[in-house]
Amino acid sequence: MPFDPAGGKPLTYSSYLKVDELLALQVPLSDGPEHDEMLFIVIHQVYELWFRQVIHELEELRARLTAGPSAPALATLKRILTILKTLVAQVDVVETITPVSFSSFRDRLETASGFQSAQFREVEILLGARDRRIVDHHPAGSAGRLRLERRLAEPAIWDAFLHYLRRHGHAVPRDLLDRDVREPAPPSPEVQAILLAVYREHPVQSMICERLLDLDEGLQEWRYRHVKMVERTIGTKRGTGGSSGAEYLKTTLFRPVFPDLWAIRSQL
């Protein structure tokens, strides 16, 4: 029987998953406490756990795209897309918290806001967001900021995809392969021409393109559902982190992370 290395006791479901420690992390702050604060805490902790897994899978996707074979990359993309569907579906649970119920404990949140989620920002950076303001919103020297600084210096998923295309014989311009990854990847007519050829002549490679587009669309769907959830819960009130709430979130909508894949749709 396996043993728990920390305590020398037989390994159990609870000790392996640290269930006791996990269940001690939900600590409502409201008086009573207010009933729905528990759900609010649980759902956001679950989001953070899923963000951790998405980051884990995006790192794997980047490595598999860079290596070249299509099948492993497609398998990882399928998992990421399935998780993303779960993230979107969980908004339905959040929306069971009514505006009146949320207002009963909202003041306890003070300046805490989902805007401060370093892990979600990691997801954005891995997908290609290269905006210093993402990093600057986190305190200097904090663990979250250090992770984001590191991510900004790493290739994004799109960079790995360009190397994937190169490995499959496509003439991706060298300046795009060797670019400064700390800067956003510019739209490229040369890459768009390659993508058109991929769709017309290389069915398996085109599946990679389609799954990346699904990922882009799924992220935009999650943003939209998040905006509408905030709007129906707090209306036009300011966000808890000092942002303009739903109005700020609306500015993040419909920003593709892979613009070249969208640019070619009218030419297919």
Image (tube, rainbow, N blue to C red):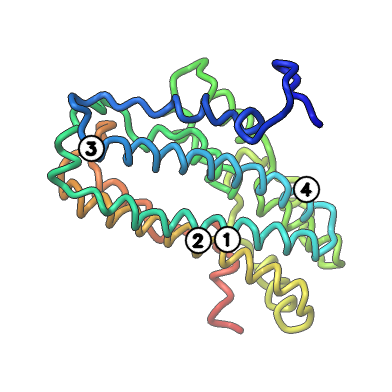
Q: Residue furthest left?
A: 100
Mark 1 touching mark 2, by CB under 8 A? yes
Write down the residue under mark 4.
Answer: 63
Q: CA gap, disc 3 to disc 2?
A: 27 Å
* Mark 1 element type: helix
Q: Amino acid at mark 2?
A: Lys
Q: Is residue 219 left or right of residue 5?
A: left
Q: Earlier in the sequence, mark 3 or mark 1?
A: 3
* Mark 3 element type: helix
Write down the residue under mark 1.
Answer: 82
* Mark 4 element type: helix
Crowding at mark 2 (Cα within 10 Å: few <14, some 14-19, many 20+) = some
Mark 3 touching mark 4, by CB under 8 A? no
Pick the residue in front: 62 or 45: 45
Q: Is residue 116 above or below residue 211?
A: above
Q: Tell me where residue 163 appears, x and y as whole percent.
A: 78, 55
Q: Earlier in the sequence, mark 1 or mark 4?
A: 4
Write down the residue under mark 2.
Answer: 85
Q: CA gap, disc 2 to disc 4?
A: 23 Å
Write down the residue under mark 3.
Answer: 35
Q: Earlier in the sequence, mark 2 or mark 4?
A: 4
Residue at 70 percent across and 79 percent down: it is 199
Q: In the picture, residue 91 is in which quadrant? A: bottom left
Q: In the picture, residue 45 is in which quadrant? A: top left
Residue at 33 percent across and 33 percent down: it is 113
Q: CA gap, disc 1 to disc 2?
A: 5 Å
Pick the residue in front: 33 or 15: 15
Crowding at mark 4 (Cα within 10 Å: few <14, some 14-19, many 20+) = some
* Mark 2 element type: helix
Q: Tell me where residue 229 appears, x and y as whole percent.
A: 28, 53
Q: Earlier in the sequence, mark 3 or mark 2?
A: 3
Residue at 50 percent across and 18 percent down: it is 142
